[in-house]
Amino acid sequence: MNYFFETLKTRNEAMFYFGLLCLAGALACLLLARVQPTQVLGINAWYKPFKFLMSSAIFVWTMTWYLGYLGKSPALDVYAWGMIVLFTFENGYIIWQASRGELSHFNVRTPTYSMLYSLMAFAAVGIAVWSMCIGSRFFIGSFPDLPTAYLWGIRMGFLLFFVFSLQGLSMGGRLSHNVGAPEGMFTIGIPLLNWSIKYGDLRVAHFLGMHALQILPLLSWYVLRSVPATVIAGILYGCLTLLSYLEALAGKPFWLLSLFGGSR
């Protein structure tokens, strides 16, 4: 673990410390959830910033790790600080709204909320597109020091990350992540993640697709160790993620959520 953190710090110190700050913030939100009863739509208000801060820490550290394979350049430094700015705005708004017991996402109740929500969506798209531009270097560059299977894990991870991060726009367009629930109803689901076990939930595909950026490279490095196996795993993972999206659009909960008592 010390090697991991020391390597991250060497590869991009600013992003390393920002990821550490996000992790500390996530733990603080968990503590606040224990001591503050503030709720939004029947769920403790601090769970949402906890999830976003944890996801931000994981993403920032993942990209920091990959930046180490791309060498040093001004463009990568600009990207690193760009991510820090965009994530700071997005998470800052989510934390601010949680502290006030207000929705951050899908909140267009006032012109100010509508503007801030639009800016948050712009930041999310900027993160996805800019990161994919960085990720494209793994498709066109030469990386003789990386195992080929691992390189393909990174490539497929970036592709699925990009597609399903932008899939988040389908939630923004609906002003809801639930499909099939009564109008204006937000449902409580599985513990912590709160994915619905009764209605379609577009967050499942969003989560699975975005975290392909970590899952597929790790699988290729530690388990698969071959290009064909990595490509097949990536295709199957993509099909599973697409299935969860299509099920959600049909108003059905993801089939694996039946383990939590959901019905088909």
Image (cartoon, rainbow, N blue to C red):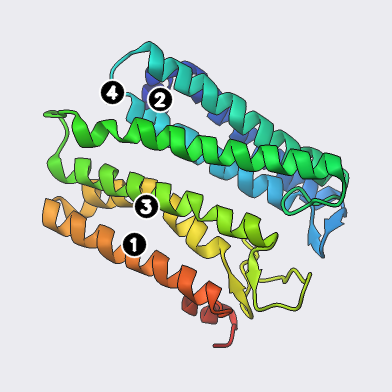
Name above or below for residue 240 compared with residue 120.
below
Q: Are marks 3 and 1 in contact (CB under 8 Å)?
A: yes
Give whichever of discs 4 and 1 has the lower sequence position.
Answer: 4
Q: Which kind of residue does numbered mark 4 sit on? A: Leu
Residue 26 in the figure: left or right of residue 69? right
Quick one: 3 or 250, which is closer to the camera? 250
SS category of the residue bearing label 2? helix
The first of marks 3 and 1 along the sequence is 3
Disc marking residue 70: 4
Amino acid at pointer 3: Leu
Left or right: residue 12 versus residue 232 is: right
Instruction: Give the vertical position of 107 relative to 5 (above or below).
Output: below
Indicate the position of residue 131 as horizontal and vertical percent values.
42, 34
Q: Position of residue 59 (x, y in %)?
A: 48, 39
Q: For this rendering, which residue is in front, 15 or 126?
A: 126
Task: Report how far apart the C-alphas of labels 4 and 1 lie in the structure.
Answer: 26 Å
Q: Residue 80: tell me if it is visible.
A: yes
Report which residue position mark 2 lands on: 8
